[in-house]
Amino acid sequence: MPSPRLRTLAAFAVAALSAAALASCAASGDTSGNGPTEASVAVLDEFFAHLENGESAEAAAMTSIDFPEEFIDEDFYAASAALPTDATVIDVKGSDEHSVTATVEYVLDDPENPMTATYKVKNTDGERRISWSNDSFGVINVGSPGRLVLNGEMEYPMSADAARVSLLPALYDFTYDDPTGTTQLDPDGTNEFTVAWPMDDQPSDADLPARVNVSTANVSVIAYVETDVTDAVDAQIEELQAACVAEGLAGPSCPASVVEYDKPLIDPSSVQWLREPGYGVSGTDGVVEYSKGFTLRADGDSYPGHAVYEGTVTRDADGVVTFTRK
């Protein structure tokens, strides 16, 4: 029978072997997903080094995202407001054996307020690929006559459908360009903004023009024609109405339907223009149209149909609004 001393030594040896086995298991990673992450962090370090150097194609090749060529073109990427610099992994979970989820902090435009976003590195048969929560977002411009321009190159006109955009991490430049001059993104005249991508949280509205909404899923704009523009057009239509009456309801200042009715005006003071509903502003890509319809009464008679003034509206750099009749 072993002595008490030998039994104690044996127990100590078993405990030591068990501890060593646990330490070995932790070092190699286990099926619960907890384990070493150094290899995945190294992949992220290489990825952000490519981004900082503007090597967009090389960075894109390290991801699991199928980027359209135009979005990883180096000139397009270099046109961003800022590229990521000084990237640091500040939190990491998972295991190199399976997948790692990491929070990465990096500088875009403001070193005092670095950006953070979540990235995933997945190991598939020894090949590690990077991804993030949304591999694309929508650019929505459904009601604005101007175009959104991304990084000075990609244009997004008015459309009933959202355009899908796949971008590498960066701070991207958006500009709103309305050739009619009648709409803008903010009452103060601001038509530019930036969007950091990817993002974990929705940015503050305080950093954006009033008619821009940015979420983790899309960028949308709703730039509408201001009342000062429609007021200016209404004043021009009133001038046309006065001239039409002076022309005896038969001249070029009158709506076509009035001239076609071909009834001589006897008493100019009897003319009434009664506003009809259902007319107003409408927009298409690069064009703003305005219409205003009336029931016309003169000499105790109502003219058939509506007398309609319609045309396109523009505003020049000096703020002068022009109504061009169709």
Image (tube, rainbow, N blue to C red):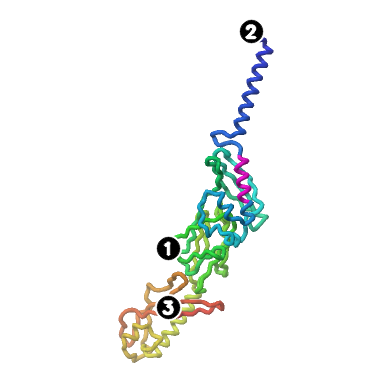
Residue holding disc 2: 1
User: Residue 197 in magenta?
Assistant: no
**Res 32 quadrant in image:** top right
Q: Is 141 left or right of 189, judged from the image as shown?
A: left
**Which-is-in-front pick, marks 1 and 3?**
1
Residue found at the very far top of the displayed protein: 1
Element on which disc 1 rests: loop
Residue type pointed to by label 1: Ala
Q: Give me the residue at 42% from left, 73% from top.
A: 280
Q: In the image, is residue 307 above or below residue 35?
A: below
The segment highlighted magenta reads 37-48
User: Residue 45 in magenta?
Assistant: yes
**Which-is-in-front pick, marks 3 and 2?**
2
Q: Is 279 left or right of 50, judged from the image as shown?
A: left
Q: Position of residue 120 (x, y in %)?
A: 56, 45
Q: Position of residue 190 (x, y in %)?
A: 57, 68
Q: Position of residue 318 (x, y in %)?
A: 56, 78
Counting residues from the start of the chain, the first of labels 1 and 2 encountered is 2
Residue 311 is labelled as: 3
Residue found at the very far right of the displayed protein: 5
What type of secondary structure mainly makes up the magenta span? helix
Residue holding disc 1: 160
Task: Give the crowd class for mark 2: few <14, some 14-19, many >=20 residues within 10 Å.
Answer: few
Element on which disc 3 rests: strand
Q: Quadrant of the C terminus?
A: bottom left
